[in-house]
Amino acid sequence: MNIEFGPELEAFRAEVCAFLDTAPTPAIREAGRKLTSVFGQFEQVMEWHRILYKQGWAAPHWPAEHGGTGWSVEQKYIFAEEYRKRDLPPLLPQGVGMVGPLLIDIGTQEQKAKYLPGILQGDDFWAQGYSEPNSGSDLASLQCRAEADGEDYIINGSKIWTTYAHHANRMFMLVRTDNSGKKQHGITFLLLDRMDYPGMTVRPIVGLDGFPEQCEVFFEDVRVPQSGRVGAENDGWSVAKHLLKHERGGGAQSPTLKRGLERIREAAQHTPSGFGTVLAEDPVFQRDMGELEADIASFEHFEKLAVSGHPIASDPAYPSMNKTMNSELTQRVTVMLTQTIGNEALPLQLEALRVGANARPLGTDLELIAMPWYLNSRATTIYAGSNEVQRDLIARTVGREG
Amino acid sequence: MDFTFSGEQQMLRDSVSAFLLKHYDFDKRNAIVRSEAGWSRDVWGQFAELGLLALPFAEDHGGLGGSMADLIAIAEPFGAHLLAEPYLASVMLGGAALAKAPDGSSAAEWLEKIMTGEAIAALAYEEGAGTPDPAMVGLKAAKTADGFALSGEKRMVLSGRDADVIVVAARGGDGKLALLTVDPAAYGLTITPFATIDGRRAAHLRFDTVALPTDALILDDAETALRSLLDRAILALCAESVGAMGALLKQTAEYAATRKQFGVAIGTFQTVAHRLADMKIAYSKARATLLYTTALIDAGQSGAKDIAILKGQTGKLGREIGEAAIQTHGGVGMTDELSISHFHKRILANDALLGNAEYHLRKTGTL
């Protein structure tokens, strides 16, 4: 066993810190401070993406030949750790985190050449068209149809929970190309290189936090080229499953949770408990914080074991366990946050939350974000495979630990 | 970073597991626990031969100079086999306290016998629920003309009945903590022995002005030393609990896959499946924290908060796993005949010793 990152890595950490301390613009930092979701405010996140690209750091986990950094797992962890300590908004995951790695793994040479540069450089933003109104956890039951017609497909149906589709210029999606067999058979994975094909309509959906983060996308006889297909026709389910490997888990999520706790702790120093002391001195608050902090620490240890190559990460349930732990801890942090902030979280301040807002927040930044962050985080146990589905997957592996 | 066992540690772990599998199955273990002694001198002798009793002691003291990673490599299998022998009491608590004595002290002779298995040591430290922290120790060691006089009470002293030498943590006249060795036959010492719920032997100790010679004092100003040995004992306790949790997970998964009700294996019901998933999540967290904290201690980087997190998480997650295992087993989970209840009681006992989860989690929130 060895806990050290090694001295050469400390030099690397210094380099990362120097960059992260100076490169983000004030607007990017503001977007980070006002983050109430995994999806930061679009313009600033994309601006930050392009700055990271110029530094060569937009996609640390990509292979070096495709524009990745060639960093070791420890270096990637250090980068993620320092990044998240600074309240910087994460890059949007659909491109560099999802469709990019998928194309690197199984895209055609033509698809790689056409799409990877735009993903890496932050010029393109991809929407993810998976869920449908009647196909959520049971994704394989999806019914959005694509009929082959010459060199094209003609798409009819709709997709929902397509995050930021109203900002997207491209889309990857699952469509039904055959209805005759098992539901997993007959699904095809398509890349759309435009969002403004005739017959395509995007309807933003205002969420419970007041923001139009999610969308519904409608297709009415939308003609798209078959060259956008990834993998074989009717084999899209295995393509989607491959992509899931990239969507769930991995990386370093615990520094975000730890930063959340730190901000709660700071607020508790001057928030009255209602029993004559400040919250930070209240035994019940201390007990609640201790319990949450200890659980986050265990998640951090779990992540670090995986990063260091411990066999725990090769357990087939690792991605599902990681997703379950991270999402539920995120929710507990935001619950603790709203409980700490108390009724200062009640004013609705949608304008003040916008980067570059004309309205000043009524209180602190933390009071501003507490409630929308809490509300938004209810989605973490629903998206990317609900936690019920994750537990089904985990249960199948129980008893087969090494 | 690396949190795996080395080749040597894996071999040690495998040989201990193989030994326990052969000589310490559940039935043999129960026969030992129900015997008059409550533990086996034979097994203890084998442990001595395998070098386990000398493992964590420094080479200067005649030990093997093992790391904490070496220690948990054997302590997890101890938990998975519900060990009743006094490894924690005599090696990690009593022996570790003797090892804190400066060179030339009378403690050295005792330590040698602890490592060969000839003698058993105990550490009399806890005084009830109020002393998870050394700062709360109240038992008095008053200075007398020819030594010390101990007055007060110690509770839940593991191996308190069987110890050949008892190390007592007491508060001197100057308010500082001291470690003193006491002969179990000393006049004024009343030992009330009992078996614990998880099959170990322990005792409450009452000191009514127990007179000790000057050389009974093995360490003055002992708080730092005591904290350090308690940290390591907590690690061993937690490793044992994690070993027990792993066994519960495995056995419960097997049971859910084979036990049929309504014509199907109960593991196919989603409520049962999800409980199993939660058990696996809890186990993965506890084990990750155990391995990480071990590496921290071995690197000399552990702080009070790291130990509190380990003890708090192990107690909390262990209870969750034990209770879920009993519920999943249904009626048979309630019996003494199945190992399930025994694992749960071992986890509960380890939680209650040296500060329970409630204490350590609140402490985590204050550090």
Image (spheres, coloured by chain):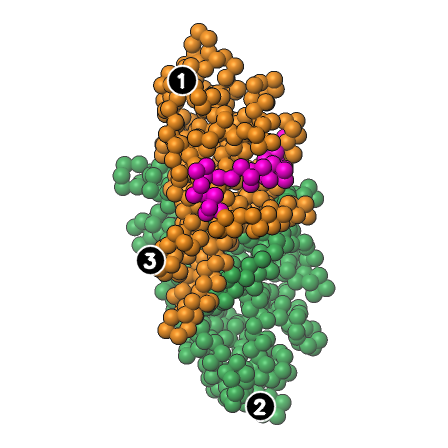
Residue at the spot of label 3? A348
Image mark 3: chain: A
Q: Is residue A169 above or below residue A297?
A: below
- For disc 3, the neighbor class at 10 Å (few under 14, some 14 to 19, many from 20) is some
Please, which residue is most extreme toward the right here?
A65
Q: Does residue A349 sit above or below A261 in this rendering?
A: below
Provide the chain ID for the residue under circle 2.
A
Chain that the image shows in orange = B
Residue labelled with disc 1: B187
- What is the x, y in percent for residue B62? 65, 28
Give the spatial CA distance, label 2 vs label 3.
49 Å
State which quadrant residue A247 falls in: bottom right
Q: Which residue is mark 2?
A: A148
Question: A8 and A208: which one is in front?
Answer: A8
Find residue B157 and report its horizontal and vertical position in percent: 42, 32
Residue drawn at (37%, 54%), measured in percent from left and top?
B335
* Chain A visual colour: green
Residue type indicated by callout 1: Tyr
Is residue B45 located in the magenta-colored stretch of the structure?
yes
Q: Nearer the viewer, mark 1 or mark 3?
A: 1
Q: Is residue A43 visible?
A: no
The magenta region covers B29-58
Residue in front for this viewpoint, A137 or A25: A137
